[in-house]
Image (cartoon, rainbow, N blue to C red):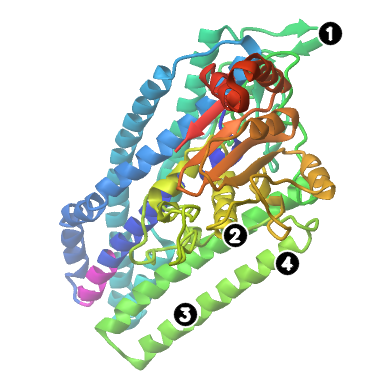
Amino acid sequence: MLTPEQMEDAGELVAETYRQIEAELLDYLVGKMIEGDVSGQRAQTAIRLLSQSMPLELKRIIDAHASELDAAVRQEVEGSLAASDAFDLSRIAQAASVTLSKAALTAQTLAVALSAKEMLARDNLALSEAARAKFLQWSTWCATQVGTGAMTADKAMRKAVRELAKGGISIPFVTYKDETGKVTVTNHADVAVQRHIRSLIAQGASQLTMDRMRQAGVGFVEVSSHIGSRPSHAEWHGRCYHIGGAVEVDGVRYEDFEWGTGYRGACGPYTALGDQLLGVNCRHSFAPWAPGMPHAYSPDPKHPSGLVNDEVYALTQRQRARERAIRATKREIAATQRIYDASPTPESQAEVAKLKLKLRRQQEGMREFIKESNAKCKPGTEVLKRQPRREWAGDRPKGHDKIASSMRHNEPLVKISKDKNALSVSPKVNTKAYHDAFEGMPVPKAVAQSAYEQAGRILQKTNGTQHEHLAAINARTGELLADNLDMPAHDGKTGFTKTQHDHVTACQDGAVLVHNHPGSKPPSFRDIMTAAMEPNVKGSVVAGHDGTVWFFAADDPEIANELTRLYNLYKDAFGDYAEVRAVKTLVDSGMIEWMKA
């Protein structure tokens, strides 16, 4: 299962690259329009001839990003499918006590990556043709205005260039069939490509889930839920279904999966592309389940901010609209600057200044909008967060690591002092590999980012000491629930106050714990016992001072029982090492999910 947050983020790295490609294509088109002659009677013929010569240059611009796109696709597909499969395998272990090989994950990852590469090749052709069509559209308009005497050549060219840049380049996304025939929907290149990638990842993950369930003999699924679902999706999300027909278990009826959700459009009331599970722009997913198991989702999800779902959805959509407007203004500024560079007149200079003022006001408005929206929330929560990367439009920072830096800070995660000892934090924590270790954890991207940041805070605080500190974050959103960084520290142990503990356990989404080990040792006996005995703890991160990082999930009391049994078995023979031996045996048995990087 992919969480709604993972589904939302899927394809963002690829979309970011396409925003850069779009900006470069627009810059090329703008340059050609500025250089062209739209005044003469042969203008339209010349425009058409010029547009016909463009495909090779447009292809060269797109192809220059080929390796970057390949890396982005690989990272998106591998990370998403690994997170989905890890969740599914843990659920299958609970539902059927079966441990499955990871070979299926590797095969499915390769298949989805190949499909994505083929899809991008088609999108690139569509993007090139759309760029050429845009040039032809606005150049022809410009020539017409001049030819009819409606505008001077200079005025017509300036307006055409700005409109071309502001509108951007759109490509077909999907074709619907209804009683009127075919209606093709177009989106900006970045949006269309992200939706294509998201669809491929969602379909690949769901196919892997179904294959896993067949292998394990699991016949029930739980469907995810999220706030702001379209009305038809709200009728089936957050519920459990049976594959292969409706059944009744212990007096509870479980509808057929395909009929109840419209999955694959096979049957039932939700077969329309916009109504079905994993249909157009759907962020829902599903996971193995069995009657009696706890539920991961609710049919009526609540936002931690306390705001009603409709308001949360409206606010997020308003933020997206503001982001689109900012990107459009940035594209228009770039084009207008090109006009000024070619002909530095007072009029074109004034246009650039006016647009830059517009951009500043849009950015100020975004900051104020987010501040006002978060002021409506419960204390300590927020509904919106500024997303600068979604506002880039060809202005990506120079030297920015385009692929795997989505969670890195511009500043080092931990500032290493010159005075070092054996307990000092390693410079490795400021590397891409350390960042990637968090991104590979089977948690939502927002949670991985938050865990990375909290680990940095803790390591900075404990650098060069034996002290340990602890933080807890929301297991769904990554919101910081509590930390003890301002409390007196102790060597070799850490914990929360009762008030902090109560606040963490009250979080309906569960929590992920983050703490450090100065000696860079693996998670301890006590770490695992705490996670296993606290049902609200969905995962734990342990950051070593040498740059190693562990993630483990032990959200089952049976794990605590087994660990205690193993300790009692080993304590006479191994003495002080009995706890270490018990933990190793437990990990080797596969009873807990354990990752080290």
Give the residue pinned by disc 3. Answer: 356
Camera-side mark, 3 or 2? 2
From what the image shows, is residue 71 above or below residue 569? below
Camera-side mark, 4 or 3? 4
Give the residue pinned by disc 4. Answer: 372
Q: In which quarter of the image is residue 71?
A: top left
Q: Is residue 30 magenta?
A: yes
Tell me which segment is drawn in magenta: 29-39
The answer for how far apart the CA atoms under marks 4 and 3 are is 24 Å
Amino acid of disc 2: Lys
Camera-side mark, 3 or 1? 1
Amino acid of disc 4: Glu
Amino acid of disc 1: Gly
Dot 4, how many residues are within 10 Å of its Cα: few (below 14), some (14-19), or many (20+)? few
- Of pointers 4 and 3, the one earlier in the residue sequence: 3
Quarter holding the N terminus is top right
In the structure shown, which secondary structural element does the residue marked by tag 4 occupy? helix
- Of pointers 1 and 2, the one earlier in the residue sequence: 1
Dot 3, how many residues are within 10 Å of its Cα: few (below 14), some (14-19), or many (20+)? some
Give the residue pinned by disc 2. Answer: 461
**Residue 190 seen:** yes
